[in-house]
Amino acid sequence: MGRSFCLPPRRLLQAAALLAALPLLFIVPGCAHREAAPPVLDKVVWPPPPLEPRVAFVQSIRNSSDTGIAKGFFARVSDLLFGEEVTRVSRPYGIHVDGKKRIIFANTGTGSVHVIDRGASRYGVVTGPEGEGFLSPIGVTEDPGENVYVTDSAAGKVYRFHVLEQKVVSFIASGLQRPTGIVYNPVTDLIYVTDTVAGQVVAFTRKGEEALRFGTPGSRPGQFNRPTDIAVDAKGGIVVTDPLNGRIQIFTGRGAFVAAFGQMGNSSGTFAKPKGVAVDSSGNLHVCDALFDTVQLFNVRGELLLSYGTRGGERGELWMPSGLYIDGGDAIYVADTYNDRIQVFQYLRDVTEN
């Protein structure tokens, strides 16, 4: 199910043509390989000058050409003869970045999961279990064994594949009504899934055994109205977006209610359609709002610190953003869903300082 830039399977039939064209490498100008330059911090920042910047735009990824992955010899010759094959980002949603900087995201527009592995010079595409395929992949996460877990909201299942093999070998959870958000918690060694229709969060072991579940439909503390996305903080706490209640809720790893903040509204600091959520190294919460077309940044007390990203299609602009992930270096990855791209930002400093 994986796909590499080394030699895509559909081009095996072109091998004879490639071999015959080898001399062209020495007589056709412009065919020498060029390494892509690493992304550089852009001058698009929030808040804007003259205030001190706290979030900066870094890069947009619309397709495989934007990743900086170096292509193999035969792939470059094939591009020369038959045109470049480009894998495109289409309606991305859930996103995860692991310790090796591999970017893994649900490409809902094509019903697949993409794995951008710059270290291995590989862009992989996983389409689901053989003979079935994903119906509606939404969320992704990864455990320490480099196993990737994918929620399929339409199938009501959670699938698993190894990040290197990129072939779905099993599903670990069934009986869910509509699984959406998913996150691995290193403190409890459990995988937490939001079951949106059931109004619950369900936690599983890495073997797929149900460990606990918490929440019921409703609007009281600890209850949910169509929970969607989920994140884990440095202490193993679970952060859940509760969109139809217009709030964010926080729980312990065992499911005990801790706190909640937010309300429905149409102004900064309130929520219209909260989706992706992530926690930075300072403990601040970043929340995508798909209707505001922005990411709102709150401190641990639920106080709004700033918003970044504005409505549009240019650098740093967003159109119905959904998934959100912050890595260990405070790089922020946003699934800019209706702009068909992943946008990368950088959190610059602790904005909670007085």
Image (cartoon, rainbow, N blue to C red):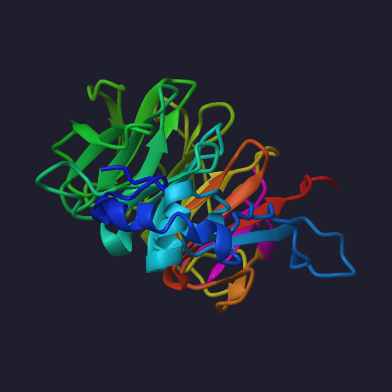
Q: Nearer the viewer, residue 116 or 156?
A: 116
Q: Residue at x 56, y 52 (%)?
A: 333
Residue 343 position in % (x across, y down): 57, 60
Regarding residue 215, the answer to whether it shows in the image is no
The residue shown at (23%, 25%) is 208
Q: Looking at the image, can residue 135 be seen? A: yes
- Residue farthest left in this picture: 131
Query: From the viewer's perspective, is 336 left or right of 134?
Result: right
Residue 304 inside the magenta-drawn segment? yes
Q: Position of residue 328 (x, y in %)?
A: 63, 35
Q: Is residue 31 left or right of residue 228?
A: right
Looking at the picture, tell me which residue is in the foreground, 119 or 61: 119
Q: Is residue 70 magenta?
A: no
Q: Quadrant of residue 230?
A: top left
- Quadrant including the N terminus: top left
- Number of callouts in the render? 0
Q: Is residue 72 above or below residue 51?
A: above
